[in-house]
Image: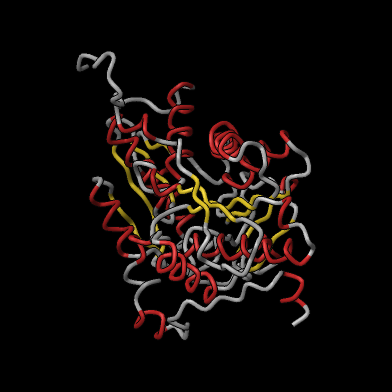
Amino acid sequence: MPKPLAGLDIAPSVLELIGGTPIVRLGRVAPHIATPVVAKLETTNPGGSVKDRAAIAMIDAAEAEGRLQPGDVIVEPTSGNTGVGLAVVAAQRGYRCIFVCTDKVAPEKVALLRAYGAEIVVCPAKVHPEDPRSYYATAARLKAETPRAFSPDQYSNQSNPRAHYETTGPEIWAQTGGRVTHFVAGAGTGGTISGVGRFLKEQNPAVEVIVADPPESVYGGGDGSPYLVEGIGEDFWPTTYHADIVDRVIPVTDADSFAMARRVTRREGLLVGGSGGTAVTGAFRIAAELDAAGKADESLVVTLIPDSGRLYLSRVFDDDWLDSRGLPNDDEVDLRPPHAQRDG
């Protein structure tokens, strides 16, 4: 081990830089909405996403329990960001990685995983989770076939939500001075919304926890049919999603998610991905609802940007790609309150 650099403000490794992400006000997205909306920028984590937090928590727990040892192989199904987080940790700890992605994953993510030295297997997205071709089934098969394989299993590993209960939630509470009234985020595994939501509600039971979700996702009552936003929504119920913490779910379409990602990028100078667009859309719809109720001055809506738009330049920010899928290539978003959208 290299000699420590005592007395200097220098992190001993990249893993020490996970967490402690900043919060910024989104003041230009919708200037007509008075209720403040602020965003926690998980893009500043070393691997570029919120998934770094769960990745190191799952690996640390597995090592401490003796389930992961030197020479083992990490095998995991991932939409990309968890894989990157695991690859960052694996680079520091010396593990080989095999990740299973669907063909919905942006090519930039696949290239990034390979840059970290991971082996990638790509499976079809438009199949049932129990289909042997699905990425869940493929990952299970690879784990069984690979000697000394270990799967963190982000969909059932409670270290996932615990990471956000112990880090992300306390950070938000401290950064807002305890003034947060609403937390709006997307949910994939559900780890972020469950961990952050539980912590915030323990500090103040009046805090509302809201999932912004593709309408096709099971979280909001959908049937899990395909949609284009990556990393959020599910076609099954992970045990890392704690439904008792969630107050409500707001559906946000692919079109609005991608348009908002473009709007945030062009108006705020923050390059965010499609799921960030989903979360920000949900947050501003809640803010519009609070405006209508005359609660702008007493409310603070916090949302979370899970990753950067750099991973989606060939999709969310590519007009031809959007056109080919029948999606608008502008930044016009429906920001009416949720009840107004239901009423037409």
User: Residue, x 64% and y 44% (percent of image)?
Assistant: 194
Q: Position of residue 329 (x, y in %)?
A: 43, 81
User: Residue, x 28% and y 50% (percent of image)?
Assistant: 119
Snapshot colouring: secondary structure
Q: Position of residue 272 (x, y in %)?
A: 42, 60
Left or right: 161, with 65 as reference point = right
Please identify the quarter of the rendering in which residue 273 is found: bottom left
Q: Nearer the viewer, residue 243 or 169?
A: 169
- Total numbered badges shown on the rendered structure: 0
Q: Nearer the viewer, residue 99 or 233?
A: 233
Quadrant (top left, top right, bottom left, bottom right) of the N terminus: top left
Left or right: 165, with 245 as reference point = left
Q: Position of residue 203 (x, y in %)?
A: 71, 34
Please identify the quarter of the rendering in which residue 100 is found: bottom left
Above/below status of 21 relative to 316: above
One can see residue 126 in this view: no
Q: Residue furthest left?
A: 2
Please identify the quarter of the rendering in which residue 66 is found: top left
Q: Position of residue 209 (x, y in %)?
A: 69, 50
Q: Nearer the viewer, residue 188 or 25?
A: 25
One can see residue 14 in this view: yes
Quadrant (top left, top right, bottom left, bottom right) of the C terminus: bottom right
Above/below status of 187 relative to 242: below
User: Residue, x 41% and y 62% (percent of image)?
Assistant: 102
